[in-house]
Image: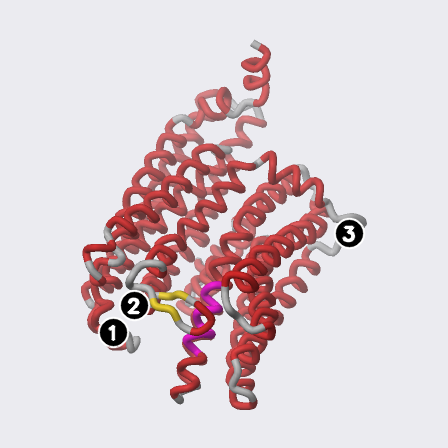
Amino acid sequence: MAGIGFALERLYRGTSLADRAASFAHASIVAAGPCLLAVLCIWLISATISELEGRSNIATFRALIIYSFALSFVVTAPVALVSARLISDKLHDLSIAEVPAIMLAAFGFAAVLLVGCGGILFGLMLDLEPAVIAAVMANCALIGLIWVACLFASVTRDYTSVTAFFALGLAISVVAVTLGYKLRPELDVMLWGFNLGLGATLFGLLIRIVATFPFAVTSVPLREVARSLARYWPIAAGGLFGAAGAWVDKWVVWLSPYGTQIQYGLLHAPLYDSAMFVSYLVVIPAYAAFIIHLEVQFFRNYRRYYSSILEHATLAQIHARGERLRAETIASLSAITVPQLVVCGLVALSAPAVVSLLDLQFRQVGILRLGLIGAAFQFLFITCSSLTLYFDRRAVFFLLQLVFLALNASLTFLLLPFGPNYLGLGFLAACAISALIAYLALARTLYRLEYLTFIANNPAHRMRRRAA
């Protein structure tokens, strides 16, 4: 994200309030574009279709979109993270011409995984009609490819176009679904209408990526990407566990007595799902601030620290830059997390008014309050665990994601007997514990920076240890 972050920081430091608002809007799209597109599209469609039959179709439509969103996010996470590492290596080696080929290879792996997993879920496990299966498979593939495309689009620095293409896709989806329903009120028609908007967004992102990296692709490096998945298996497995951890509490609730079954055997938990999604939306500004401030500032200090080593600076100079990297990283994390916790606390206190405003049920007040605080801690967990990858702490990243997955699944299950008002308690506890562990892991990494640089992560030292 650092490439797009510098341009966003310049916009944020503009003199007008509009510039700052635009910077947060662009950063929000970069951080959670597919999520915002899906949520806003479903909300607008629900507002335009009011009759009883339409409401029934919307419930099934919403459930299928959620299934596609979850499956695509979990399946593509390993490919996206390893591709990010591979791109980082190529940019470091100034091999920019290889970026389009890597993108095509990542698309290929993601598409194969999505089709395979989607075929099992939608074709075998659910009782869907063939027309609906085809539409939802396309939907799942498009969402997954957009996740991967966002990774490559983040280094184009053309944040205005990225935001515009997501807005265009949203508009096309809402219009296409609404008109399609009026012409033929069937589920597959609604899904294909939504797919039109997703296709427009994906096509737009690809245009910007190709314009930024206009290099001919002579061969697709499938073997190189496959070797990278094996070489960086802690990153791939960590990405898989982290993505699954973000959804596992929903899956546990769906399978519990609080879950309900609708058409085609689809399981969901409306009381839990809608409250948790609102909680995630409240925390999006924190992720935007992370992209604008923390990652730009962190990356600058990070580069200065390692540049001083390559430039053969004195130990005192290297130590001073390491101190600055550590101090400003922790200060920036606190500057973002503490206000976000305050905002979530204020929204939690006004939960009854929020529930009334969003046309939710009063029974969801407790779930919303727990989800809001939990989502704030989840932000801290994600940022801290992600930053450990900058220091090649792959095993630490992997273990953190595994801990979060295990805690979120087990605590959500164990706390189900407390009743529907405490459905988010397991999620909150898992996020708080995981955030504390991740913060301590990041702090320990920053305080052992010189040791990690010259000893633990030094390839020459590793070879001597193996030889011994």
Q: Is residue 429 left or right of residue 116?
A: left
Q: Quadrant of the C terminus?
A: top right
The amino acid at mark 1 is: Gln
Q: Which residue is mark 2?
A: 271
Tell whether label 1 touches label 2 (CB within 8 Å). yes
Query: 10 Å neighbourhood of mark 1: few (<14), some, or many (≥20)?
Result: some
Cα distance between the residues tagged 2 and 1? 8 Å
Cα distance between the residues tagged 1 and 3? 53 Å
Residue 362, x across and y down, in percent: 21, 72
Instruction: Tell me if residue 438 is in the magenta stretch.
Output: no
Range drawn in magenta: 58-67
Going from N to C along the chain, the mark reached first, 1 or 3, is: 3
Query: Quick one: SS at disc 1?
Result: loop
Q: Quadrant of residue 164?
A: bottom right
Q: Which residue is mark 3?
A: 217
The residue at the point 60 percent across, 46 percent down is: 83
Cα distance between the residues tagged 2 and 3? 49 Å
The amino acid at mark 2 is: Leu
For the stretch drawn in magenta, the main secondary structure is helix
The residue at the point 68 percent across, 50 percent down is: 105
The amino acid at mark 3 is: Val
Going from N to C along the chain, the mark reached first, 2 or 3, is: 3
Residue 447, x across and y down, in percent: 37, 28
Q: Nearer the viewer, mark 1 or mark 3?
A: 1
Going from N to C along the chain, the mark reached first, 2 or 1, is: 2
Q: Quadrant of residue 59?
A: bottom left
Q: Which residue is mark 1?
A: 361
Q: Is residue 321 above or below residue 40?
A: above
Residue 197 visible here: no
Residue 82, x across and y down, in percent: 58, 43
